[in-house]
Image: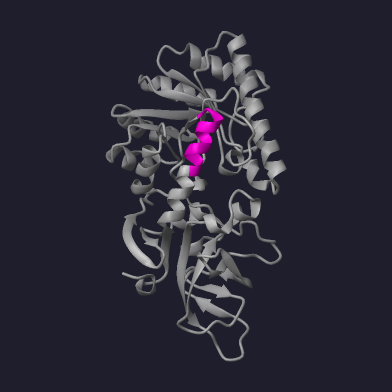
């Protein structure tokens, strides 16, 4: 099959760019002296994770127990569920942990209580807020010390270490700013680990990492592993942040122009919110961009000022009158959300489809 024969809307993965991205980050982790535990929520794809493992990934990171089960069924036996423990799903987690090495994540004494009541020796990471302000204990507080001590002294669970995600690297728009946030993440975690050790609390692992941070950080002294995810595919946001170039972006949505009325200043494509999501990414909220259009994908050039400015469920509104029947490749703002809307990806080399890969997008 050729690219021109693919029914739209479709998720397209460029295998050459993908494999280059994977190799680059594997090399980066080795240079920084940390284990790579990629977050597979970005691609949800066995074939990509197998390539990451072949390049030296220590294990994988997931956001959901569904992802953990699927990848366990396909031979991945070292998985960190990097999401605050959902108490109602403890039995599912226990069943999986009996089969593989599963790390779970907590940031509260209530979660520790639930784990201990289960009676199972879960491997547990303490989630730390290193500045993103989402989840995790404040490492400067007595509360953080209390939860860490609970884990370390537990006669039931096994304390794996401390884990964080500096999501605010996504708001840093220059290399210097991303490096500064990544250094803060590293320093906060290294200092917290030393604080715990000074209290006779062993800290086996210190886990950090985001794609913007990993592309900018100068060193990772005091850190044992990194968990970037988006780097496999990249997207428009990463390109605007400077984490990659447009020629590194491996995931696009192929879409067809389905309506373009005479005299109108817009046209409609068949990629709406269920293909692109409603994440406006790096856009100006006053003039949102739900996806930009490649003029020449191979050259990494975008069509000047042409974008998808609005989406409903299945419709995408392009701010230019494109001819009905034309097919364009859209670079999504956020690859992770876009991939999750598809059941399969067409894997291409140039214009030729070389494979189709299942996207495990269940919940």
Q: Does 254 appear in magenta?
A: no
Task: Locate residue 124, reporting x and y percent.
Answer: 45, 24
* Quadrant of the frame with the N terminus: bottom left
> What's the image's color scheme?
one colour
Q: Is residue 298 left or right of residue 238?
A: left
How many tags in the picture?
Answer: 0
Examine the rendered structure and indicate whether residue 347 appears above or below residue 43. Answer: below
Q: Which residues are magenta?
A: 24-34
Residue in the foreground of this view, choosing between 154 and 164? 164
* 148 or 270, nearer to the observer: 270
Is residue 226 in view? no
Residue drawn at x 57%, y 36% as measured from the top left:
165
Q: Is residue 53 visible?
A: yes
Q: Residue furthest bottom?
A: 262
The image shows residue 108, relative to residue 357, as above or below, that is above
Along the line of sight, the residue nearer the viewer: 338 or 146: 338
Which residue is at a point 35% across and 70% down the rendered structure image? 2
Residue at 33% in and 41% down: 71
Answer left or right for 356 relative to 241.
Answer: left
Q: Position of residue 210 (x, y in %)?
A: 56, 40
Q: 120 above or below 307?
A: above
Expressed as whole percent of the image width and height from the top left, the position of residue 123 reads 41, 23
Q: Is residue 346 left or right of residue 281?
A: left
Q: Nearer the viewer, residue 148 or 54?
A: 54
The part of the image, by quadrant, that contains residue 339 is bottom left
Q: Position of residue 198 (x, y in %)?
A: 62, 9
Q: Is residue 305 above or below residue 79?
A: below
Q: Is residue 29 rendered magenta in the image?
A: yes
Q: Main secondary structure of the magenta part?
A: helix
Residue 107 position by quadrant: top right
């Amino acid at each position: 099959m050729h690219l021109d024969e693919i029914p739209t809307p479709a998720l397209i993965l460029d295998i050459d760019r993908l494999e280059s991205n994977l190799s680059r980050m594997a090399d980066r982790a080795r240079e920084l002296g940390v284990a790579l535990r990629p977050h597979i929520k970005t691609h949800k794809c066995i074939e990509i994770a197998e390539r990451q493992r072949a390049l030296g990934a220590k294990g994988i990171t997931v956001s959901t127990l569904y992802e953990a089960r699927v990848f366990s069924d396909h031979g991945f036996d070292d998985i960190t569920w990097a999401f605050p423990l959902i108490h109602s799903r403890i039995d599912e987690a226990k069943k999986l942990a009996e089969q593989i090495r599963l790390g779970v994540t907590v940031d509260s004494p209530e979660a520790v209580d639930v784990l201990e009541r289960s009676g199972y020796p879960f491997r547990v990471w303490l989630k730390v807020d290193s500045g993103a302000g989402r989840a995790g204990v404040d490492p400067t507080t007595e509360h953080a010390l209390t939860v860490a001590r609970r884990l370390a002294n537990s006669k039931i669970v096994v304390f794996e270490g401390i884990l964080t995600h500096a999501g605010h690297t996504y708001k840093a728009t220059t290399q210097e700013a991303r490096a500064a946030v990544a250094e803060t993440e590293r320093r906060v975690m290294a200092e917290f680990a030393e604080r715990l050790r000074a209290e006779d609390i062993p800290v086996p692992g210190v886990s950090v990492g985001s794609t913007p941070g990993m592309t900018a950080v100068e060193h990772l002294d005091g850190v044992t592993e990194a968990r970037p995810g988006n780097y496999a595919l990249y997207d428009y946001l990463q390109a605007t942040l400077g984490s990659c170039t447009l020629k590194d972006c491996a995931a696009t949505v192929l879409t067809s122009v389905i309506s373009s009325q005479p005299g109108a200043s817009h046209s409609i494509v068949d990629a709406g919110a269920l293909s692109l999501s409603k994440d406006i990414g790096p856009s100006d909220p006053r003039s949102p961009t739900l996806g930009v259009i490649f003029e020449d994908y191979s050259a990494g050039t975008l069509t000047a000022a042409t974008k998808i400015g609005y989406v409903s469920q299945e419709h995408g509104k392009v701010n230019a009158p494109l001819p009905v029947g034309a097919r364009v490749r859209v670079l999504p703002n956020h690859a992770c959300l876009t991939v999750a809307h598809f059941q399969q990806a067409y894997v291409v080399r140039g214009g030729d489809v070389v494979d189709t890969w299942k996207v495990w997008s269940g919940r």
